[in-house]
Image (cartoon, rainbow, N blue to C red):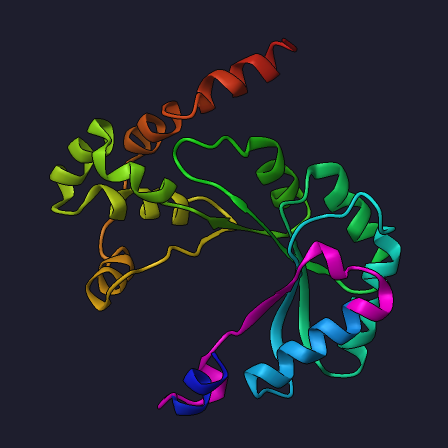
Amino acid sequence: MGKALADATVDRDELFVTTKVWRTNLEYDDFLQSARRSLEKLGLETVDLLLIHWPSRSVPLDETIEAMNELQSAGDVAHIGVSNFSVDQLERARELSDTPILTNQVEYNPYTDQADVLEYCLENEIILTAYSPLAKGKVSDDETLAKIAERHGKTPAQVALRWLLQQERVAAIPKASSPEHLQANLDVFDFELTDEEMTEIFDLQGGLLTKLQRALGL
């Protein structure tokens, strides 16, 4: 990754670089060392976003957040965030941090209901970053997505990405195995899903049922 950044033909300001610290390195000193090793490997003085990869059951969160805030104060990190945090864990992180939690990176796609996390993110101006947005390729064989895709002259994968991006405060980070797939992932800004189509896709994860059950207190 460091070589790729060094060889890049675009300016550093045009890149948004994110790195994570694994849950075995969440103690204060370990976290600082791990983050700074990542900076060295990347050949950067600052990363744009530093994430806790997974919450830990053994390391107090305040210890990790303190290290993250120190890295920010030192200029090593511009923004901090978390990954795979529940609503309660996310709220605790916000309470502990001297600076805003920019994002919570969680698995989110047409088959994964993240309604509670998304609702909390909306209320607190946090970005929900969706990893595995294509459900490891599962969306390509989905009949509902295929029908919607045909209407727009797109692929089911592009429809799934568009569904995510049309949701407030949601970002998506799809993987791409080839330049062609990368370009296809980027070609999702020239069409828009209707409200009805958005609802059809939410139905794939039981989204409407979940909302109804919550409204009825079930």
Q: In the rendered view, would you say 48 is above or below 112?
A: below
179 and 114: which is toward the camera = 179
Task: Report which quarter residue 43 is drawn in.
Answer: bottom right
> Which residue is drawn at the image coordinates 67% and 59% (left, top)?
22
Left or right: residue 1 compared with residue 53: left
Q: Position of residue 175 (x, y in %)?
A: 37, 57
Q: Is residue 17 magenta?
A: yes
Q: Position of residue 147 (x, y in %)?
A: 16, 31
Q: Is residue 78 magenta?
A: no
The number of discs equals 0
Left or right: residue 117 compared with residue 3: right
Left or right: residue 201 compared with residue 15: left
> Which residue is drawn at the image coordinates 35% and 90% (left, top)?
9
Q: In the rendered view, would you say 15 is above or below 133?
A: below
Q: Position of residue 58 (x, y in %)?
A: 84, 46
Q: In the rendered view, would you say 122 is above or below 206?
A: below
7 and 70: which is toward the camera = 7
> Which residue is drawn at the image coordinates 32% and 47% (left, top)?
162
Q: For the view shown, which residue lies furthest in the front direction?
A: 24
> Which residue is drawn at the image coordinates 67% and 50% (left, top)?
54
Q: Position of residue 154 (x, y in %)?
A: 16, 47
Task: Find the magenta span and give its range.
Answer: 8-30
Task: Report which quarter residue 189 is drawn in.
Answer: bottom left
Left or right: residue 191 compared with residue 35: left
Where does the C terminus fall, quadrant-wise? top right
